[in-house]
């Protein structure tokens, strides 16, 4: 195996280990987003320009990187 492939494999393994080690799956669930909806609505009521600006920035980055989540954001 070449050195670059080994680095990529180690990186992927490290990301998977971090995902499970820090229990990041709890933040990528529909239940989590439902629980945080009220917090988000309060933030939007307090600072609508910040929320709209952050969304626009994330939207541009997602589409520039051609990530599949772009269809959901639209």
Image: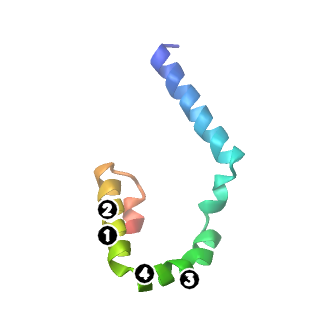
Residue visible at 50% across and 27% down in the picture: 8
The correct choice, above or below, for 11 with respect to 2 in the image is below
**Which image quadrant: the C terminus?**
bottom left
Residue visible at 55% across and 79% down in the picture: 39
Q: Residue furthest bottom?
A: 45
Give the number of the disc on residue 57.
2
Compare marks 4 and 3 and give the one earlier in the sequence.
3
Q: Tell me which corner region of the image, top left, top right, bottom left or bottom right, holds residue 45.
A: bottom left
Measured from the top left, where is residue 5 in percent x and y?
Answer: 49, 21
Q: Residue furthest top?
A: 2
Give the number of the disc on residue 53.
1
Compare marks 1 and 4 and give the one earlier in the sequence.
4
Nearest to the observer: residue 40 or residue 68: 40
Say whether marks 2 and 4 touch (CB < 8 Å): no
Measured from the top left, where is residue 50 in percent x and y?
Answer: 35, 73
The correct choice, above or below, for 10 with respect to 40 in the image is above
Element assignment for label 4:
helix
Q: Which residue is mark 4?
A: 44
Nearest to the observer: residue 71 or residue 17: 17
Say whether marks 2 and 3 touch (CB < 8 Å): no
Compare marks 1 and 3 and give the one earlier in the sequence.
3
- Disc 4 to disc 3, how far (Cα)? 10 Å
- Disc 2 to disc 1, how far (Cα)? 6 Å
Element assignment for label 3:
helix
- Disc 1 to disc 4, how far (Cα)? 11 Å
Residue visible at 64% across and 53% down in the picture: 24
Give the number of the disc on residue 38.
3
Element assignment for label 2:
helix
């Amino acid at each position: 195996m070449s050195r670059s492939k080994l680095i990529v494999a180690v990186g992927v393994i490290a990301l998977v280990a971090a995902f499970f080690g820090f229990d990041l799956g709890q933040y990528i669930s529909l239940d989590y987003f439902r629980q945080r909806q009220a917090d988000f609505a309060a933030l939007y009521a307090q600072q609508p320009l910040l929320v709209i600006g952050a969304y626009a920035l994330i939207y541009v980055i997602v589409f520039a990187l051609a990530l599949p989540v772009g269809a959901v954001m639209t």
